[in-house]
Image (cartoon, grey):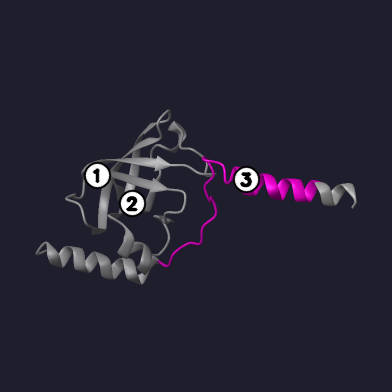
């Protein structure tokens, strides 16, 4: 057998014996539709980033407009969100002041935003499912 074949078999056997690395995580993901992202998020809001704790990737956002929420939050309130990285670029202080529409999850009582979570630019037209979610959110609050 050629040397290349021995190497391939050795690598395959090592992978089977050792198993996947403990740190391994899939860093590629398909973007969900806006409707699915709204359904799955704990909070969907237009926000402005006001503080970045770079070491722990904790982000403080001012919530400017809520589209949907399963948590108790009001517009104008500040919320802390843990940014979970994969192969995404970590936030730095240079991002303070940026605006976007974020789809935030809830894990163990903490708000989290990860690499695979949807984020939309605040300056683009708002998709229909978000407008409908906003109407529902306002209606639920008697507004």
Q: Secondary structure at mark 1?
A: loop
In the displayed structure, 111 sits above or below 119; it is above
Total numbered labels placed on residues in the image: 3
Q: Residue furthest right?
A: 2
Residue depth check, mark 2 versus mark 3: number of the one nearer the observer? 3
Towards the viewer: 137 or 122: 137
Q: Residue at x 11, y 61 (%)?
A: 141
Q: Residue furthest left?
A: 142
Q: Which of the image's four quarters has the C terminus? A: bottom left
Q: Specify the quadrant of the image occupied by residue 45.
A: bottom left
Q: Residue at x 51, y 44 (%)?
A: 86
> What is the spatial separation of the Cα atoms under label 2 and label 1, in whole angstroms?
12 Å
Q: Position of residue 93 (x, y in %)?
A: 43, 32
Q: Secondary structure at mark 2?
A: strand
In the displayed structure, 126 sits above or below 120; it is below
Q: Residue at x 32, y 51 (%)?
A: 105
Region rendered in magenta:
7-33
Asked if disc 2 and disc 1 are in contact, CB closer than 8 Å, the reply is: no
| N-term mark: 2 or 1 | 2
> Is residue 29 highlighted in magenta?
yes
Residue highlighted by disc 2 = 104
Mark 3: few, some, or many residues within 10 Å (few <14, many ≥20)?
A: few
Residue 96 has which mark? none
Asked if disc 3 and disc 1 are in contact, CB closer than 8 Å, the reply is: no
Q: Residue at x 42, y 67 (%)?
A: 33
Residue highlighted by disc 1 = 109
Q: Residue furthest top?
A: 55
Asked if disc 2 and disc 3 are in contact, CB closer than 8 Å, the reply is: no
């Amino acid at each position: 057998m050629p040397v290349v074949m021995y190497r391939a078999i050795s690598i395959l056997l090592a992978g089977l014996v050792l198993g996947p690395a403990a740190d391994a995580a899939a860093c590629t993901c398909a973007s969900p539709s806006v409707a699915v992202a709204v359904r799955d998020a704990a909070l969907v809001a237009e926000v402005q980033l006001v503080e970045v704790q770079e070491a722990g990737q904790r982000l403080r956002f001012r919530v400017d407009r809520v589209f949907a929420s399963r948590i108790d939050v009001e517009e104008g309130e500040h919320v802390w969100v843990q940014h979970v990285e994969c192969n995404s670029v970590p936030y730095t202080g240079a991002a303070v002041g940026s605006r976007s529409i974020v789809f935030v999850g809830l894990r163990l009582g903490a708000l989290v935003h990860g690499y695979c979570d949807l984020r939309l630019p605040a300056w683009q037209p708002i998709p229909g499912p978000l407008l409908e979610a906003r109407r529902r959110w306002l209606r639920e609050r008697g507004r």
